[in-house]
Image: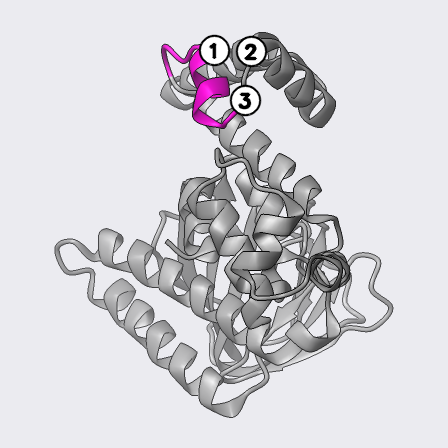
């Protein structure tokens, strides 16, 4: 499996909330700081996007698609001078998958999806992205527009199975945006995601994702990439932003965190699966990376999961 597909699958979205809003007149809506990522695609009309901490607002028009992965609060507005309404006043109580008009509609029709992920791999993915991920290539916009049109159609018709179809289409739209973004800006950014555009670095990253338990060395990774050890180490650090074995350790710890969250997980088995010769060496590495020993981390995750299940069932 390619690294991007693996990371997205391992992120395991806890929920996807989707819908469309047809806004009429002038309005400004403020969204609070959030977990996960928002996806917005403008079907018709125009609006402004202002992310907290960014000096300039971004004008969005028909066909534009953006992802907001930073978790910062943001505003969507037809007029930036208007005092913003709290998003809860506009959207709370709306059923998932609904299409609704505000102020009669006709000014700006926008599709939205909010992805809430499990922690760990999701931060690994979202943390390397810019505050606003935009797609600029005209052909890419057309491709995404087709996907968005299918979602809008499913939401409007409400046919049997539409929720499953919309969920899958929303995933497709997110992956396509990341893919197009990668092709457009990889040359100017560092991070594991952007390094995938470098064929040789992509080979090394894929090798570590395919076999994280293998006893990789800088030399063996360089050989897999058909490069000298020195040239590989320098290029990896430049494109990824960290040394090869530091990346491998981070990857192992993310996989360990995922396994430890599973019922019945044993620290010794997780350590063995990830190539550690002893439980103690694994536990030390895990504590350095995650801030807690493996058993305490597992207990904390299960406690949080139980609390979340109790909250959602209440």
Pointers 2 and 3 in contact (CB under 8 A)? yes
Q: Find residue 279 and name its label.
A: 2
Q: Find residue 268 and name its label.
A: 1
Pointers 2 and 1 in contact (CB under 8 A)? yes
Residue 269: say if magenta.
yes
Taking the image as shown, residue 15 lies to the left or right of residue 225, namely: left
* Number of marks present in the image shown: 3
> Of residues 275 and 46, which is closer to you in this image?
275
Above-or-below relation of 39 to 281? below
Q: Position of residue 81 (x, y in %)?
A: 81, 71
> Of residues 65 and 28, which is closer to you in this image?
65
Taking the image as shown, residue 217 lies to the left or right of residue 144, namely: right
Residue appearing at x 68%, y 16% in the figure: 284
Q: Using a 10 Å C-alpha cutoff, classify the residue at mark 3 as few (fewer than 14 neighbours), some (14 to 19) or many (20 or more).
A: some
Q: Find residue 276 and name its label.
A: 3
Q: Where is residue 51 in the image (x, y as percent from the top left)?
A: 74, 61
Q: Is mark 3 on a helix, strand or loop?
A: loop
The CA distance from mark 2 to mark 3 is 7 Å
Above-or-below relation of 12 to 139? above
Residue 155: say if magenta.
no
The image quadrant where one finds the C terminus is: top left
**Can you name the residue that lies furthest to the bottom here?**
138
Q: Using a 10 Å C-alpha cutoff, classify the residue at mark 2 as few (fewer than 14 neighbours), some (14 to 19) or many (20 or more).
A: some
User: Which residue range is magenta in the image?
Assistant: 263-275
Q: Is mark 2 on a helix, strand or loop?
A: helix
Residue appearing at x 67%, y 65% in the figure: 132
> Of residues 232 and 25, which is closer to you in this image?
232
Q: Where is residue 152 in the image (x, y as percent from the top left)?
A: 32, 70
Q: What element carries label 1?
A: helix
């Amino acid at each position: 499996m390619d690294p991007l597909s693996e990371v997205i699958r391992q992120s395991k979205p806890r929920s996807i909330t989707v819908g469309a809003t047809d806004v009429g007149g002038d309005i400004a809506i403020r969204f609070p700081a959030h977990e996960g990522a928002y996806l917005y695609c403008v079907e018709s009309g125009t609006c402004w996007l202002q992310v907290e901490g960014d000096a300039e607002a971004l004008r969005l028009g028909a066909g534009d698609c953006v992802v907001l992965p930073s978790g910062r609060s943001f505003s969507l507005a037809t007029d930036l001078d208007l005092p913003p309404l709290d998003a809860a006043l506009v959207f709370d109580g709306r059923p998932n998958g609904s299409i609704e008009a505000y102020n009669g509609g006709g000014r700006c029709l926008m599709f939205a999806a909010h992805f809430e992920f499990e922690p760990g791999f999701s931060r690994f993915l979202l943390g390397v992205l810019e505050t606003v991920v935009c797609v600029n290539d005209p052909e890419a916009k057309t491709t995404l527009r087709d996907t968005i049109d299918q979602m809008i159609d499913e939401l409007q018709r409400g046919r049997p199975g539409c929720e499953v179809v919309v969920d899958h289409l929303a995933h497709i739209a997110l992956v396509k945006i990341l893919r197009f973004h990668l092709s457009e800006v990889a040359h100017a950014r560092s991070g594991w995601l952007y390094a995938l555009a470098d064929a040789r670095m992509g080979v090394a990253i894929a090798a570590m994702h395919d076999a994280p338990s293998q006893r990789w060395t800088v030399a063996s990774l360089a050989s897999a990439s058909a490069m000298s050890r020195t040239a590989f180490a320098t290029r990896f650090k430049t494109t990824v932003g960290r040394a090869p074995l530091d990346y491998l350790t981070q990857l192992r710890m993310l996989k360990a965190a995922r396994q430890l969250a599973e019922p019945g997980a044993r620290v010794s088995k997780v350590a063995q699966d990830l190539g550690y010769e002893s439980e103690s060496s694994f536990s030390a590495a895990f504590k350095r990376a995650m801030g807690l020993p493996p058993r305490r981390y597992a207990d904390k995750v299960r406690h949080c999961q139980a609390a979340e299940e109790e909250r959602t069932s209440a």
